[in-house]
Image: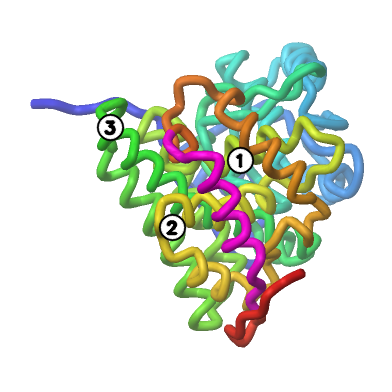
Amino acid sequence: MFSKAVSLPIFWMIGENIMGDIKDVLSQYNMVFHRPLVVTGSGVTSELGENYFSSYKRVSINSNHISDVEKVKAQARSVGSDLLIGFGGGKVIDVAKMAATELNLPFLSVPTATSNDAVASPVAVINFGDYVKSMGAMAPIGVVADLNILRNQPRKQFLAGVGDLFSNISALADWQLAADRGFERVDPVAAYLSRNAVENLFRAIENGSDLYATLVEGLVVSGVAMVLAGNSRPSSGAEHLISHALDRFPIHDLHGLQVGVAAFFTLRLHGMDHLRYKKLLSQIGFPCSWQELNVDRETFMKAVQLAPQTRSGRYTILSEVTPELLQEAYDEVYGVSVSGDGEFSIQD
């Protein structure tokens, strides 16, 4: 009998007004912790943390720098923590996740924003000063997502989460391409979960369903897909490499927005129907061109050239295309705008 051992979230709770005492939430799943440490940001999430975790030890961080990881680890050791709770956006969750991994402690994810798939992924993006690195980490034991909190996040952060989840379509195409070329093997269950998470989001947009609940569940499932695959392939392809390259330039934006806008381009390189996705996402105000993110053509094309270097050994569509095709794809993808009613126009 063959099997594969993986560490998946034991539960996820998504709903309205579910932020009661976290210990009560955990006890529903027969989990008892005595000295939780709550990791928050230094702004709004710190204030929210005082409201929701007043009886818990807390530590605030300023960024996802490695020094913040060390700060959390030191505080956890000081109070003898047996659980780390990440309460905040992607950077806070990544820092708490990385600290928990290095301390071999369980980690609970309580997002206040859905700007990327850090919510439940086995990856933590950490800033080392001269470079940013995606590091392997433990997935959370659970996710508690209160929709009342998430509805109050800036619209831009919500759209960034949409972009990060949507980009799974491009990542899966790259994964299949790498498998077709004999470099990797696709995990069918992980690929199914990743694709299904995006398709559920698309259906919610088309049907007018609750996008916040669908998005956060999709981000959790996307993280589970990465755990099953044992890597980030279900959710990270050429579009992510382009975004990582853009981060090295002075002008860049939220990760999720960048990978989403880049995915239109990489889907075109794959010969897929990028216009269908532009039409759909434009209905909720998602940016469909780099002009909307203040990234000019020259900067973007430089990022595309640099992209493969950000993760050597990852085979994507960028490994096969010619400079001429890149220019042609840019003109086709970003030279056409799509209005919310599905009408097309040529941009200058």
- Give the CA separation, mark 2 to mark 1: 15 Å
**Disc nearest the viewer among 3 and 1:** 3
332 part of magenta stretch = yes
Q: Position of residue 306 (x, y in %)?
A: 64, 29
Q: Which mark is residue 181?
A: 3
The answer to the question of whether label 3 and label 2 lie on touching residues, with beta carbons closer than 8 A, is no
Q: Amino acid at mark 1?
A: Ala
Q: Amino acid at mark 2?
A: Ala
At numbered mark 3, what does the secondary structure look like: helix, strand or loop? loop
Residue 316 lies left or right of residue 176; in this view the side is right
What residue lies at 62% left-to-right and 14% top-to-bottom?
A: 103
Q: Which quadrant of the figure contains the N terminus?
A: top left
Q: Which residue is mark 2?
A: 197
Q: Amino acid at mark 3?
A: Arg
Q: Which residue is mark 1?
A: 118
Residue at the left extreme, as displayed: 1
Q: Which quadrant of the figure contains the C terminus?
A: bottom right
- Give the CA separation, mark 3 to mark 1: 30 Å
At numbered mark 1, what does the secondary structure look like: helix, strand or loop? helix
329 part of magenta stretch = yes
What is the span of residues highlighted in magenta in the rendered image? 320-338
The answer to the question of whether label 3 and label 1 lie on touching residues, with beta carbons closer than 8 A, is no
Residue 337 lies left or right of residue 180; in this view the side is right
Q: Is residue 180 above or below residue 290?
A: above
- Give the CA separation, mark 3 to mark 2: 26 Å
What residue lies at 78% left-to-right and 59% top-to-bottom?
A: 291
